[in-house]
Image (tube, helix red, strand yellow):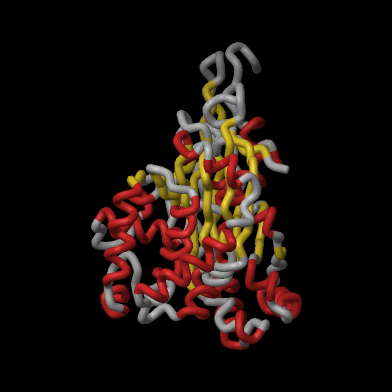
Amino acid sequence: MPHDGATFGGAGTVETPTPAPAAAAKPAIDVRADGETRSRPPAPLYAALDLGTNNCRLLIARPERDGGFRVVDSFSRIVRLGEGLAHTGRLSDAAVTRAVAALGVCRDKMQGRGVFRSRLIATEACRQAENGDDFLVRVKRETGLELEIIDRATEARLAAAGCASLADPEAGGVILFDIGGGSSEVVWLERKRGGGPGALQMRAWVSLPVGVVTLAERHGGVKVTTEVFEEMVAEVERMLEAFPERETLSASLSDIHLLGTSGTVTTIAGVHLGLPRYERRLVDGQWMASTDVTRVVESLREMSYDQRCQNPCIGPDRADLVLAGCAVLEAIRRTFPVARLRVADRGLREGMLVELMRADGVWRRRGPRRRGRR
């Protein structure tokens, strides 16, 4: 789902334990106190790549002076790297070939744009696969890219960093969830006392060893009966019993909302809005009442596989996965019944960009100049 040209404001604070070369950016102009003007070079470009169980995604962005960043290029391709992994324990040759081809496109985009700094991560499929390290060696040999396999705690932290700015500043906290292809992260972000409207801290989190690909492969994704759907929901509900401080969180739900980042929730939002084609600007940040989520999930369950393929917000690439994602979402909603859901078309990549830019101090150095200072 494209991000090109999207602008992101500064993320809320989260405390946690070969394409044609792009046109050169125009230099910005500073006006000094004495009226003289001078140009300053554009901010450097940063890149974040997330190779998951189902998708390969890239964002290239430039920091802006207000503490946010503007996306200048993006790439997303369904590669199904984890296809068959649950049965064999290995990444298949076909899946590896698809992933390497997509990573080659990402390399070309980064080189063509002249990226200054990047972080390139791989998640659950590479964590689980017996030949995950061999895959990384092949990627390095054929594309020159060095992927980093992150652990689940890092994945939860990055998701929180990427989405925190969408939390309602008046809420006491949020339950953030990221439904992936091979794992799903659920994070309780609590409002930090005295920390201002953007200050959140991770109170508890869990990483579930299940995602849309693994769940659909176990239960089927083409024809999903009511019985099959409920079996999937029950499986995930059992996993959520391990959520730390579950009883404490359950007692605080009146002041909390869900914040979801994944293809599942963006699809639900697109269907809810009746979009003739997916548009990120209309989906990212969309609020949905619990009753609306229920209505859309029920409508998706009533669709045939062919109808899901033809839906412009689903398509044939995801038609066999979307109901598995709905089952994960339903398990989260039944475990933590809250009134509102906010949809985020952002996540790990945005979190990586925020952390890279903060570490380099780009916003601090590029902040507004004080009056009278030379």
The C terminus appears in which quarter of the rendering?
top right
Residue depicted at x 64% and y 68%: 124
Q: Give the left or right position of residue 282, taking residue 276 as reference.
A: right
Against 20, residue 35 (above or below) is above
Residue 156 visible in the current orientation: no
Image quarter of residue 349: bottom right
Residue 219: tell me if it is visible: yes
x, y percent for residue 89? 67, 82
Residue 136 in percent (x, y) is at: 72, 74
Task: Specify the quadrant of the image occupied by residue 296.
Answer: bottom left
For this rendering, which residue is in front, 111 or 162? 162
Looking at this rendering, what residue extends furthest in the top direction? Answer: 372
In the image: residue 251, left or right of residue 319:
right
Q: Is residue 195 left or right of residue 305?
A: right
Q: Quadrant of residue 125?
A: bottom right
**Residue drawn 44% across and 65% down?**
327
**Where in the figure is residue 316, as x and y percent of width and height?**
36, 77
**Most foreground residue, 240 or 179:** 240
Q: Position of residue 281 (x, y in %)?
A: 36, 49
State how many labels appear: 0
Please determine whether, in this image, residue 328 is positioned above or below residue 229.
above
Query: Which image quarter is the N terminus in?
Result: bottom left
Name the residue rendered at 73%, 43% in the picture: 17
Residue at 41% x, 45% y is 342
